[in-house]
Amino acid sequence: MISLYDILEASNGQLFGEPTAHLFTDFCFDSRRAQQGQFYVAIKTERGDGHRYIREAIENGVRGILCARPPEFDVDGVSVAIVKDTETALMAWARFILKKLGTSVIGVTGSAGKSVTVAAIAQVLATRHPVYKSTGVYGGRLDMMLALSRLTPEHKIVVLELGVAQPGEMAEMVQAVNP
């Protein structure tokens, strides 16, 4: 679960309007796949700007928005957190939540076989510890954030697939989760 107040504290973010939801099931990065109870993150990339899809994410049921600028329309019924940069805010949240929960991180990298290795490590560790493993949906930072958003206080270990899409991404992920 994601707490609005954890996001705000970790990222030094600001509320926009009155918050209506405080807990969210997980992050959403694609407004077309948005579901009830999720926290939509408006990410700006070379291919597009997630801020343009905030309305669609809300229509699809998200209850929270993380964005770098206020929406230009009515967002009643949705909690909105404004931060300087959404990706930087996510990395700050990753550090914050791992420290808060006291969860140890195992990172798996490489050019091939990461998903199988993550599954094998998690299966072995789960015989003695509560473990969560990443599912490899998006890859890179986004997959890492999805995995971390699903952690509970019971999970003592998280096994993450750390894949990269651009130069410098691995260093950012390692700094955020300290595997």
Image (cartoon, grey):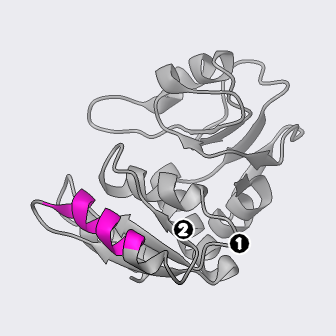
Left or right? Give the position of 168 relative to 98.
left
Q: Position of residue 20 (x, y in %)?
A: 88, 37
Left or right? Give the position of 137 relative to 18.
left
Query: Helix, strand or loop at disc 2?
Result: helix
What amino acid type is highlighted by mark number 2? Answer: Ala
Q: Position of residue 141 (x, y in %)?
A: 37, 56
Residue 52 visible in the shown view = no
Q: Position of residue 174 (x, y in %)?
A: 35, 77
Q: Position of residue 122 (x, y in %)?
A: 40, 70
The part of the chain drawn in magenta is 113-123
Of labels 1 and 2, the one closer to you: 1
Residue in the foreground of this view, choosing between 13 and 129: 129
Residue in the foreground of this view, choosing between 160 and 76: 160
Q: Residue at x 55, y 75 (%)?
A: 95
- Disc marking residue 94: 2
Q: Residue at x 15, y 61 (%)?
A: 113
Q: Sequence-wise, which precedes: disc 1 or disc 2?
A: 2
- Please tell me in which quadrant of the rendered image residue 170 appears: bottom left
Query: Which quadrant would the N terminus be assigned to in this image?
Result: bottom right
- Residue on which disc 1 sits: 153
